Image (cartoon, rainbow, N blue to C red):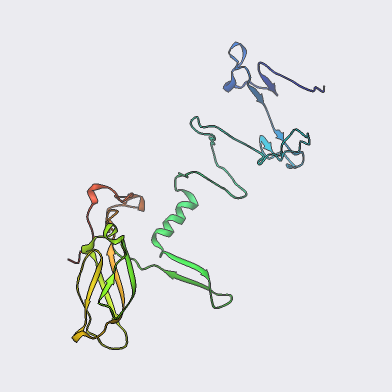
Amino acid sequence: MKLDDLQVGGQLLVGTGVYRAIKEGAERINGSAALEGPVVIGAQNDFGKNTATLMVGETTNEDPDCESPRASLGISGNIPTAVHAKGGIYLDGDLFVTGSVDCESTGRLESRHKAADASPKKFDIVHPSQEGMRLAHACIEGAEVAIYHRGRVRNEKEILLPDYWKDLVHMNSISVQLQPIGAHQDIIVKRWDTEKIYLQSKSGIPIDCFFHVYAERKDINPLVVEYEGETWEDYPDPDSNDPKYEGQNTRTL
């Protein structure tokens, strides 16, 4: 039987069986359909054998009024989710997400998280100088959430701090390291404030040195260094904003 158009006002049933989801008889849901499957939609040769109950391939419709689609399957909805899958999902290709992703950490993902928690935080890149080699560096780790500012002072007696430091760090957590260049200069840190580190050298010798300035952040809670637990999920302040853990770890004043 060949038809140009077919409109079903009640139910469309293909195959045998009773489908409770769409009901039957007087309680049937008009406009519903049940297909026993397998069902193929789209290109005839995208699937060489029965691989799923529903197989959706590329659109091959050559009707001039049929616009070329961007995807084989389009889903729209938010009641409360557009897609609800029960069971595993196997994806052979890339996954592109424009919104947020929230998932439980299990299986291989969890094993990688556990390995990452105990491993050094590093970068691993193609070696910039030696062919066939790679270069790996790891972060220095400590019992605080800190930042640093470094550079060189030449013929000056002050180290200028970044403007934003006054709002970002505990000023009473600052520490300074100085390395004289060329000669012993007996440089000391006289004092500091929210804008500068003030230096002094022996007998007024011109200052020429490298510097590192460290400070602990105050925009978030301090690191909880030791805590009871079995895994990283037991960390007591995961968002670093629990009032119970306010304060700081490092004080230099």
- In this view, the residue in front, 208 or 37, is 208
Q: Residue at x 34, y 66 (%)?
A: 141
On the question of residue 250 being in view, the answer is: no
For the C terminus, the image quarter is bottom left
- In this view, the residue in front, 183 or 233, is 183
Question: Looking at the picture, does residue 64 appear above or below residue 112?
Answer: above
Q: Is residue 56 left or right of residue 238?
A: right
Q: Residue at x 66, y 41 (%)?
A: 70
Q: Is residue 146 left or right of residue 102?
A: left
Q: Residue at x 30, y 75 (%)?
A: 211
Outermost residue toward the right? 1
Q: Position of residue 65 (x, y in %)?
A: 75, 32
- In this view, the residue in front, 60 or 36, is 60
Outermost residue toward the top? 26
Q: Position of residue 102 (x, y in %)?
A: 45, 44
Q: Position of residue 155 (x, y in %)?
A: 29, 81
Q: Residue at x 59, y 50 (%)?
A: 94
Outermost residue toward the left? 253
On the question of residue 212 being in view, the answer is: yes
Q: Position of residue 93 (x, y in %)?
A: 62, 50
Q: Quadrant of residue 45?
A: top right
Q: Quadrant of residue 89?
A: top right
Q: Is residue 229 left or right of residue 8?
A: left
Question: Looking at the picture, does residue 154 appear above or below residue 183?
Answer: above
